Image: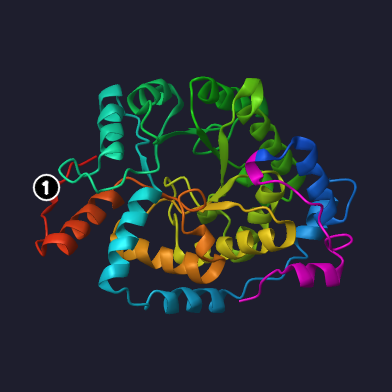
Amino acid sequence: MSTTTPTSVAETGRAGTGTAPATPGAADRSASEIADLARSVTGSASLDDTAWRRYLHGLPGVDKVGADGRAAALSTRSIKTTSKAWALDTIIRMVDLTTLEGADTPGKVRALAAKAVRPEPADPTCPSAAAVCVYNDLVPVAVEALAGTGVKVAAVSTAFPSGRASRAVRLADTRDAVEAGADEIDMVIDRGAFLSGRYSQVYEDIVAVREECRANGHHAHLKVILETGELATYDNVRRASWLAMLAGADFIKTSTGKISPAATLPVTIVMLEAVRDFRALTGVPIGVKPAGGIRTSKDAIKYLVAVNETAGADWLDPDWFRFGASSLLNDVLMQRNKLATGTYWGPDYVTVD
């Protein structure tokens, strides 16, 4: 599969001088540092559609056959017992336990928060999940329920899941969630703008949302949802990944979970290659979050293998890799119990949500 590397970027001149300025971690960068880095990498003082098109369409294309083949090969890796125990606990620590339904209630969010903190109440060795992800209006409920636990509150924002609203409305949506106490914001890009080549609009949207995440002393992390099922090609996934990272995303996320296909292993590998190459070029690490359709521990372990073999062991941490899931946790808990006791639980041993 074709990849972008610091060497190839420098050789082709797409990164200007080929040497990006020294930058702090993604979460600590200022708006001016983000813009300086974007101008350095694109080699353009003006971040207009023409500059973005020249840079993004100059990225090496993705070999679809190679991407699919690599995903299939990684899926065959065997995991031994000790490694599997570690993998199952790591998956739990990486889960953003999610409820995004119109019928969500405060009681459901409180129950989900309790499950995130103590996924297996009878086993104190079972780790907590990474976060609980909810709609904006339920952020205060989640914040209260998770206070002092270390489990984060994530909120979907920017007219999720369509993103079809004015920038002012999307920024107000973000501001509402951040001021209610959300630790993380999962925003959606305007796929229509991206697919029609209005790259500067998408870039400016992300930059503006990121500023809202950090306004008035707040410090919410920003996950940018690409909705890869609507991007149609792996080349577009790679381009959207780079555009989001250069706009200051802390994470890039595959999907809303509302559109099929959602997360797939080949698409996630393309995104993992992007964050690996972005750090090699800029020194800035960016997280990855596949979301939607990952329901079994067997599938989740395939993603961990892909993380390790594509981006590297540094990403095997909830600070840099998450699963957006609602039903995955139950299967992991059942597999974890089987590994510990030799007995396989039935689905009635775990809560539905």
Q: Amino acid at mark 1?
A: Tyr
Where residue 102 sits, quadrant-wise, is: top left
Where residue 85 appears, x then y in whole percent? 28, 63
What number of labels is visible? 1
What segment is highlighted magenta in the picture? 1-27
Q: Is residue 136 visible?
A: yes
- Residue 96 percent location from the top left of the image: 39, 43
Q: Which SS type dominates the magenta stretch?
A: loop
Asked if 117 appears above or below 24 in the picture, the reply is above
The C terminus, quarter of image: top left
Q: Position of residue 289 (x, y in %)?
A: 49, 51
Q: Please tell me which residue lies in front, 178 or 295.
A: 178
Q: Residue at x 21, y 58 (%)?
A: 336
Q: Could you tell me if residue 198 is visible in this image?
A: no
Q: Residue at x 48, y 49 (%)?
A: 255
**Mark 1, residue position:** 349
Q: Is residue 10 magenta?
A: yes
